Image (cartoon, rainbow, N blue to C red):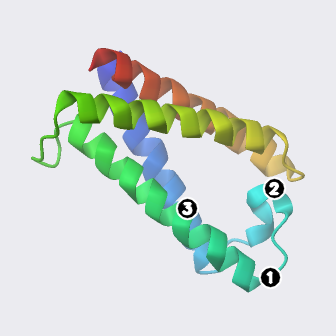
Amino acid sequence: MIALAQYGLLTILNLMLLFHLLILLKAIPYASVWGGRLKNDQEMYRFEIPSILINALFLGIALIKAELLGIHLPELAMQISLWIMAALFAFNTFGNLMSKNRLEKMIFSPLTILLCAFSLILAFAS
């Protein structure tokens, strides 16, 4: 179960990071994220850049937990990080469910539920 959670987290976070990069590059319309509430490029940049940085941080934590980076953090720091990730993914799921965008509701809600579950599994395993 731990291996599934580790690789599931890594896979989904990589895909999310790619998705947000494609939005930033305007290959995907920004109307498909943030509840369909972004009105212009300026707002898109203000939301997407922090999103990319947070996803990259979470990916780094997942890589460290999977022992793929050769970096070791104290177990307490890793456990706290995973609990924070789980909480943020839970809040994000709620936000996705409230979205005006059907894609966000139907695709990203289940993905953030999985991210939350995988983070919890790894937090409990620490």
Tell me the SS state at disc 1: loop
Residue designated by label 1: 40
Label 1: how many residues lie within 10 Å, few (<14), some (14-19) or many (20+)? few
Indicate left or right for 80 with 93 as reference.
left
Q: Nearer the viewer, residue 80 or 97?
A: 80
Tell me the SS state at disc 3: helix
Indicate left or right for 52 with 33 as reference.
left
Residue 73: give x, y in percent of width and height: 17, 40
User: How many marks on residues?
Assistant: 3
- The amino acid type found where label 1 is placed reads Asn
- Classify 2 as above or below 65: above
Q: Are marks 3 and 1 in contact (CB under 8 Å)?
A: no
- The amino acid type found where label 2 is placed reads Gly
Determine which of the numbered discs, if any, sits on residue 51 in the image.
3
Residue 44: give x, y in percent of width and height: 70, 75
If you read the primary sequence from the N terminus, does the residue marked by circle 2 or circle 1 appear first?
2
Residue at position x 63%, y 78% in the image: 45
Residue designated by label 2: 35
The answer to whether residue 92 of the structure is visible from this angle is: yes
Residue at position x 30%, y 51% in the image: 60
